[in-house]
Amino acid sequence: MKKIDVKILDQRIGKDFPLPSYATTGSAGLDLRALIEESFELQPGETKLIPTGLSIYIADPNLAAVILPRSGLGHKNGIVLGNLVGLIDSDYQGPLMVSMWNRSDKPFKIEVGDRIAQLVFVPIVQAEFNIVNEFKETDRGEGGFGHSGKQ
Ligand SMILES: O=c1ccn([C@H]2C[C@H](O)[C@@H](COP(=O)(O)OP(=O)(O)OP(=O)(O)O)O2)c(=O)[nH]1
Ligand SMILES: [Mg+2]
């Protein structure tokens, strides 16, 4: 397994709450917790930046991490991310933050240490542009945005 440097910014991690870990052998995501001072209600339509109590330094430019909603929270409670997806650059060393958005019409209570989102490490290819006048022809060509129909 890949080793990633982590700083524990909130001493409740490792004491009251574990470091994020994979829940099962096949898990893709590590659940991130709300390291808030006290529980609060996220109001309908409200967006709030929540600390996770951690910073990570990925270091390898061929890796990044994405913060994704948890499907249960997103589907059942309308609790998703204010930025839809969070992207963590390999050279970022600041606190890992989760933008929580209540897109539902009901307040949602968040308790200290709740698992609010998940972190997924992904491979990255950095590209440089090669300017051309014509592309090599393909079957699709410029067709897109549903041009091939539904069935
Ligand atoms: O949900 C998120 C999204 C981003 N970040 C951190 C890590 C990321 O590397 C940095 C910058 O994110 P991004 O590039 O998406 O934001 P930006 O608005 O372009 O800010 P910047 O100008 O700092 O790049 O903020 C988080 O902690 N949580
Ligand atoms: Mg940026």
Image (spheres, rainbow, N blue to C red):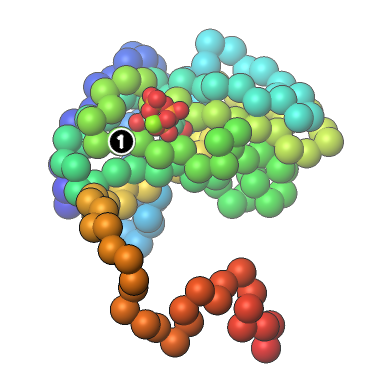
Q: Determine the image quadrant of residue 106.
A: top right
- Figure label count: 1
**Residue 32's spot in the image, x, y percent?**
44, 35
Q: Determine the image quadrant of residue 80.
A: top right
Label 1: few (<14), some (14–19) or many (≥20) C-alpha neighbours in 10 Å: some
Relative height, residue 63 to residue 42 (above, below): below
Secondary structure beneath label 1: loop
Pick the front one: 93 or 131: 131
Q: Is residue 54 in view? A: yes
Q: Is residue 114 in view? A: no
* Residue beneath the point at 64% across and 44% down: 73
* Residue beneath the point at 34% across and 71% down: 134
Pick the front one: 37 or 103: 103
Relative height, residue 53 to residue 20 (above, below): above
Q: Is residue 101 left or right of residue 143?
A: right
* Residue beneath the point at 45% across and 25% down: 97
Relative height, residue 108 to residue 138 (above, below): above
Residue denoted by label 1: 89
**Residue 143's spot in the image, x, y percent?**
55, 76
Furthest-top residue in this view: 37
Relative height, residue 76 to residue 133 (above, below): above
**Residue 17's spot in the image, x, y percent?**
40, 27
The amino acid beneath tag 1 is Asp
Q: Quadrant of the C terminus?
A: bottom right
**Residue 54's spot in the image, x, y percent?**
34, 24
Question: Does mark 1's beta carbon lie closer than 8 Å to ligand 1?
Answer: yes
